[in-house]
Amino acid sequence: MKILLTGANGYIGARLIPALLEKGHHVVCLVRDPKLFEKQSTYASQVTLVTGDLLRNRSLEALPADIDAAYYLVNALPQTSGFAGLEALSAENFVQAINQTTCKQIISLSEIDDHLGEAGLSRLHVEEILRQADAAITILKSTMIVGHGSIALELMDGLTKKSPIIIASNWAKAQEQPIATCNVIEYLAGCLLNEATFNSEFHISGPEILTFKQMLLTYGEVIRQRKVKIMTVPQVSAALSSYWLNYLTPISFSHAKTLVENLKFDLVSRDNTIERIIPLQLQSLKEALLQCA
């Protein structure tokens, strides 16, 4: 099958490519800079590259018409003034372009977001736009993704470099249901032209619910190979926490800001329907971390 992939340079998109190729699919990657993609990806010679920018609808005219399915894995833009509008424009241009093809399904990945802050509202708006496409839509909403190079792993790595770890008290108590990157890829691949997933939304998560404090302790045990000490402090401002994470870790300020907001709330799945449609051997946090050690 011919599969269109947007966000091919992103964390999940880059890891989805080999999974699709392994299944014998013809992968078409929409990229703004083919030279950059060729430099970053070891699979550049095995896929078809189409140059285009989702913010410029005329640049999408080069998309092949015989697409069977498409992945919309465009990274969320920083949630500052005006960027929510650009996310919507990107989705609108994508829908207009995909409606000119034979695409039967669009698969998108976002986050479970119950508190609906600015970022969550923007994601919901994008999802509503994607639902207007002629193709069936499948939306996967994930909990915290853990794997080599993931933002969650960078966060835990940065926080555990020094001891004791100092975190806000509500971070320590926040419940998480982390999912391994490899399981996210398996779900994305398993949804492909699977009619049981058409026009549906699913939560995807790992097999265990842990507090963020327990996650840090597990990270210390597996990766640092030592028992980390954690000290909690009263809640500090979101801005100060964001700058602090930006200083301690490689995470950008915009991503740090989103993480801080998410860590104020529990991030757990409320729906396991996907497990019946696509049964997987889900990895625990410790198993996911062992793959990164």
Image: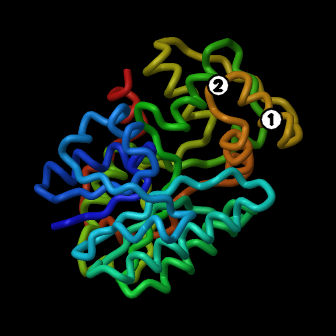
Q: Residue 12, relative to residue 99: is it above or below?
A: above
Q: Residue 181, relative to residue 20: is it above or below?
A: above
Residue count near mark 1 (Cα–Cα under 10 Å), binned few <14, some 14–19, many ≥20: many
Q: CA distance from mark 1 to mark 2?
A: 12 Å
Q: Residue 119, relative to residue 133: is it above or below?
A: above
Residue that mark 1 sits on: 241
Side (left or right) of 116 relative to 210: right
- Residue 141 appears in the picture as rendered: yes
Q: Residue 261, relative to residue 147: is it above or below?
A: below
Residue 180 place in picture, x, y as percent: 39, 43
Residue that mark 2 sits on: 249
Task: Kindly indicate whether the residue at mark 2 contacts the one at mark 1 (C-beta within 8 angstroms).
Answer: no
Q: Amino acid at mark 2?
A: Thr
Looking at the rendering, which quadrant does residue 289 occupy? top left
**What colouring style does the render use?**
rainbow
Return the residue nearer the eye: 186 or 11.
Answer: 11
Residue 259 place in picture, x, y as percent: 67, 44
Q: Amino acid at mark 1?
A: Ser
Residue at 46% x, 61% y is 109
Side (left or right) of 224 relative to 291: right
- Residue 287 appears in the picture as rendered: no
Residue at 49% x, 14% y is 224
First in residue order: circle 1 vs circle 2: 1
